[in-house]
Image: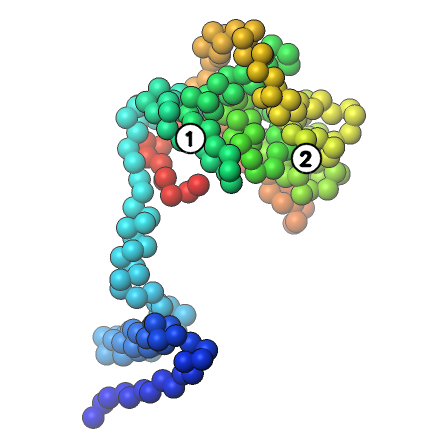
Amino acid sequence: MNQLSCTINASLDLFNIDTIENISQRFHFISNQLFASTVESHLNKPIYELSLTLSNEQYVMQSMNNTQISFSSSPFTCIHHEFVYQVMKHSQKLAVELDEQSLTYAELFAYVQMLAVQLLDQYGIISSEIISQCVERSLSMVIGIMAIEMVGGVYFPLSFRDPQNRLHMLLQQTQSRLVLSHYMTKNKFDDLTTILDIDCILVNNNLFQHIDIDQLSSVHVTIDSIAYIIFTSGSTGVPKGVSIEFAIQPTYNTGNK
């Protein structure tokens, strides 16, 4: 009769009814795909090409991934310019959150400005200069990234998990003279490396009253400037660097956090 009958025997002590029904639906779904591929193409479709995702699950996944939002600014803009635009538009909205910590756009912008001016005044950072950052996942990481971009520097991330000899080699290869760190990573470098502890600046509340923010407006950055560089692992030889420009597309994905 060209029919396939299947009975699923399961112990309710180990599986609940919803799980059993889900397994049954997936088996039915994958069976339909097998028979459909045989009828339509007269060929057996490889089982690895079959989907286990049910139709309703596919709809939910498509809905969740449909997170593109159009920028209201120019078609191509610099990263930090778009950041400032969002600060002006949503100053009191939540910008970054990690565990129990969070910052609004206005708070994040204030810290970024403070660090950016410090980079210009105390370290003489110029546009297109590579600035390394070795910071664990934290609010300080975001502040450091945006401050580097705001002064026109080239952000170069260093992993605190890397051994010291690799970190030293990458600093030499990029000729980076400054490393942004925080209390958990500053001991990864020797005394010959110039270290700027981001946390020390952020806890100094009086610093913001004595900085010249206006000098940030004179920093010249274009969409063709290099925004950051990343290096390969070097598992097949010498690590190779890849540079990314400042220009960003007119849409971004809000689902990637």
Residue drawn at 32 percent across, 55 percent down: 61
First-in-chain label (2 vs 1): 1
The extreme right residue here reads: 191
Q: What coloring was used for the rendering?
A: rainbow
Q: Is residue 97 above or below residue 17?
A: above
Q: In x, y percent, where is residue 41?
A: 26, 75
The residue to which callout 2 is attached is 184
Q: Please state which amino acid type lies under the numbered disc 1.
A: Ala
Query: Is there CB contact under 8 Å for labels 2 and 1?
Result: no
Left or right? Give the position of 30 relative to 245: left
| SS at circle 2 | loop
Quadrant in the picture for residue 54: bottom left
Q: Please state which amino acid type lies under the numbered disc 2.
A: Met
The residue to which callout 1 is attached is 95
**Near-viewer residue (166 or 20):** 20
Q: Residues within 10 Å of mark 1 (few under 14, many from 20)?
A: some
Quadrant in the picture for residue 189: top right
**Near-viewer residue (12 or 35):** 12
Residue drawn at 70 percent across, 30 percent down: 186
Residue drawn at 36 percent across, 36 percent down: 252
| Alpha carbon distance from label 2 to label 1 | 24 Å
**Which quadrant: the N terminus?**
bottom left
Q: Is residue 148 above or below residue 216?
A: below
| SS at circle 1 | strand
Q: In x, y percent, where is residue 149?
A: 50, 23
Residue drawn at 58 percent across, 21 percent down: 202
- How many numbered badges does the structure rendering display? 2
